[in-house]
Structures are given as structure tokens and as C-alpha cells.
Amino acid sequence: QVQLVESGGGSVQAGGSLRLSCVASIKTYNRRCMGWFRQAPGEAREGVAAIANDGTARYADSVKGRFTISKDNAKTTLYLQMDTLKPEDNAMYYCASGNLLYGGRCHPIVGYFDSWGQGTQVAVSS
């Protein structure tokens, strides 16, 4: 059963913007944390941003000030607005959900999420 479906990836030039979407099943969406992660070829998967049910968000240092994570409860959809994209943002982007907290908060830590989408590709050219 598919529970997380990403979309919105594509190819853009450096400095451009993309908005990723992730439609979730109700059960998956209502877990404590949802997040975005990415994996570049030959690299480990890394956390980008995470958001709690109350809307509190945490970001990786590499994307702070450029990316914004948000949720639409009526649509059970998670978003990632990506602005001022850089070539180093090239990766497959995944959305995920989980129930584990770190220090009482949701953090984009790979091992804390256990339900994953199939990913959407983002390519940024210089």
C-alpha cells in the first residue's frame, strides 16, 4: 500500500525555485513527524527538514534560509519550497514520516523515520 507519493521535482538553473509535494495517507500524515530527505549519487541519505504536528520545523544548516517545509492538513500534503537552488542541491528527494522525537522535537534524522516515499529527482544546473 502506497502511503507517501512525492511530486514536483525537475530541472532548474542555479538560483531558481521548485516546490515539492508529498501526498500522504491520513494515518501516515498524522504521525508525530514528517520530513524531507535527499540522496545524491554515491552519497548517504541526509536530512533536509522536518516538521511536527504543531508546525514546528527544523532544517539542516545547508538549507536554512532557502528551503521552507510546510503542511496542508486538509489535503494531507507535505510541501518543500526550495528557493535559491544551488548545484549542490542536486539529489533524489524523499518524504518520510515517523514517530520518534529527538530532545522532544522532530529533527530530520534518517534513522528516526520509518515510512518512505519513492522519491522525486531535483537537478540544478550551474
Image (cartoon, rainbow, N blue to C red):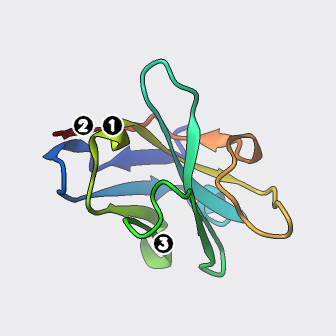
According to the picture, the residue beneath numbered tag 2 turns out to be 123
Q: Quadrant of the C terminus?
A: top left
Amino acid on which disc 1 is placed:
Asn
Q: Residue at x 46, y 63 (%)?
A: 78
Sequence-first tag of 3 and 1:
3
Residue at the limit of the structure toward the right, as seen here: 103
* Residue 73 picture location, percent across and down: 50, 76
**Amino acid under label 2?**
Ala
Task: Please say if the residues under marks 1 and 2 sit with CB atoms less than 8 Å apart.
Answer: yes
Label drawn at residue 71: 3
State how far apart marks 3 and 2 are (Cα): 24 Å
Residue behind mark 1: 90
| Residue type indicated by callout 3 | Lys
Q: Are marks 3 and 2 in contact (CB under 8 Å)?
A: no
The CA distance from mark 1 to mark 2 is 5 Å
Please state the total of marks drawn on the protein image.
Answer: 3
Is 50 situated left or right of 80 in this image?
right
**Image quadrant in which you'd find residue 106:** bottom right
Q: Which residue is depicted at the point 26% across and 60% down? A: 84
